[in-house]
Amino acid sequence: MFTPTPNDFIAVLPEIVLTISAGLILLVEAFLPRWHRTPCFMALLALGGAAWCRLTMPLPGTVWNGMLEVGPLAAYVDIYILAASFLTVLIAGPFLRRTQSERGEFYALLLLAIVGAMTMACSVDALPMFLGLELLSLPLYALNAFLRKSHISVEAGLKYFIVGAFASAFVVYGIALLYGSTATTNLLEMGRAIATSGSLTPITAIGIAMLVGGLGFKLALFPFHGWAPDVYQGAPTPITAFLSVVPKGAALIVLYRFVDASDLLRVSDRWLLAAGIIAVGSQFIGNIVAIAQRDIKRMLAYSGIAHMGYVMVAIIVSGDEGGSAILVYLAAYTLMNMGAFAAVSRLSEREDETHSIDAMAGQGWSRPVIALALTVCLFSLAGIPPLVGFTGKFVVFRAAVNGGFIWLAVLGVINSLISAFYYLRVVYVLYMQPLPSRAPAFPASFITTATAAVAALAVLVAGLFPAPLLQAAEEAVKNLVR
């Protein structure tokens, strides 16, 4: 019988801190209703404490009877998740007060979703991975529908619930088929068994397809992307920001661990064809359909589909170079998206209406700080140097070229050029269009503006000085347990 050791508990101390904090927030909400603003500060403190634990505590490697691997890769992803979540809470505080929906359960649910994402990121066994997936998904169903008086928010929650249920079913059935063909639930051992066999049996192929498909739903990859625009548009903007980066990062790490261990490029030629279609299809569908969008949250949803297509190229390459490219891109995408959504939250008059791009006309001059922050983040999303978005795309395309997939790199560059059109269109509206006859009553929020400004500054600094980010990503992948 397995008995946990002190190392096992030290390895998951950040998750323990977040879980206890979520419980305390619920108690404060229930018994101290006058302290209605305390949960926000408690959530920020919990996230800071979890990050401190991960940065200062030892990384014991494989723990919990081989089910979790807490090493440099898990630490990198945990810090990425916690940083994105910290920015989410900063945006959420003013947003919830403005919409008169500030309740402690928002922060409790968010912390539990973070625990699920961190569990997925360090899982090397299918059982804790699936538990993490469900712990991540269940709170998000409620958080997407948190604005209960808004029909579009409730609709977003329902749509995400239906799609999430299908995704979970795909994942668990794929795991069952892979277990039947490899006789193990350990993802790395599954991969080694597939790599050793040198070919895919029908059961194994179907299992891989269902696992990739289920994770593809979470990543909003083509052809599993249909839910993203409606959910992004209807969900509360801070949750849209969280949804755009944290679940995707966790799912990408799971997918990378499995593909890297399986050596699918060598085992099956069809993997390259299928994954290539997913990557290129995501890029073209995301970028072309984004051009037609007039709601900025829907535009960013299609943008996210395209960006996950770029990261899928690094998944195809896999290995150390592909893995480090994934980590660099995740960090870059987090900064860009969090800054963009913070600006959208600041430049949104009402949450029960569309977030029209035209409503931002002339705001470049009347609200210069938030407009400049949004501009920097959009330029970075387009991959314009010297911003960190260019660094992220460069390392992905370099990995593709070095891996012999020049066609993927060329198509990625073409798609980056297409994307520049709809990103620059928003900048044009901000600075070149006149103010509307009725100036929109955008809310004043110093914290949201500061969050967007800090994210934009980080985008610039990380782009000008990318060496620490590149080195951290390379070290995280170099020590990966395979």
Image (spheres, rainbow, N blue to C red):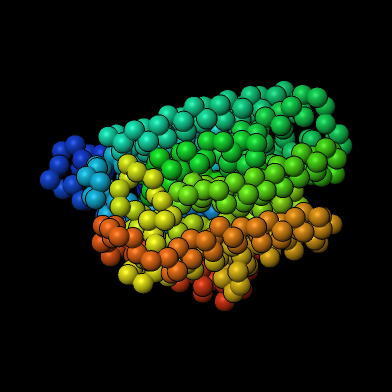
> Where is the N terminus found, in terms of image quarters?
top right
Relative to 396, 291 lies left or right: left
The residue at 30%/52% (across/down) is 349
**Is 117 positioned to the left or the right of 309 in the image?**
left
Is residue 454 visible to us here? no
Which residue occupies the extreme bottom position in the image?
Answer: 464
Please provide percent x and percent y for residue 184.
Answer: 69, 30
Would you place residue 54 above or below residue 8 in this image?
below
State which quadrant residue 271 falls in.
Answer: top right
State whether residue 132 is above or below residue 57. Answer: above
Please say whether residue 31 is visible from this viewpoint. Answer: yes
* Residue 54 rendering spot, x and y as whole percentages: 47, 56
Out of 363 and 228, give the one closest to the viewer.
363
Q: Residue reaching furthest left?
A: 34
Front-most of residues 374 and 388? 374
> Which residue is rendered at x = 68% and y = 56% of the image?
415
Q: How many marks?
A: 0
Q: Nearer the viewer, residue 392 or 131?
A: 392
Q: Residue at x 69, y 64 (%)?
A: 395
Q: Is residue 250 left or right of residue 256?
A: left
Please state the horizontal and vertical placement of residue 353, each as a whole percent of the image.
34, 43
Image x and y of residue 170, in percent? 61, 27
Q: Residue at x 39, y 62 (%)?
A: 361
Compared with residue 387, is residue 60 higher up or lower down, i.e. above or below?
above
Q: Quadrant of residue 222?
A: top right
Q: Which quadrant of the structure image shows residue 181? A: top right
Q: Is residue 240 above or below residue 325?
A: above
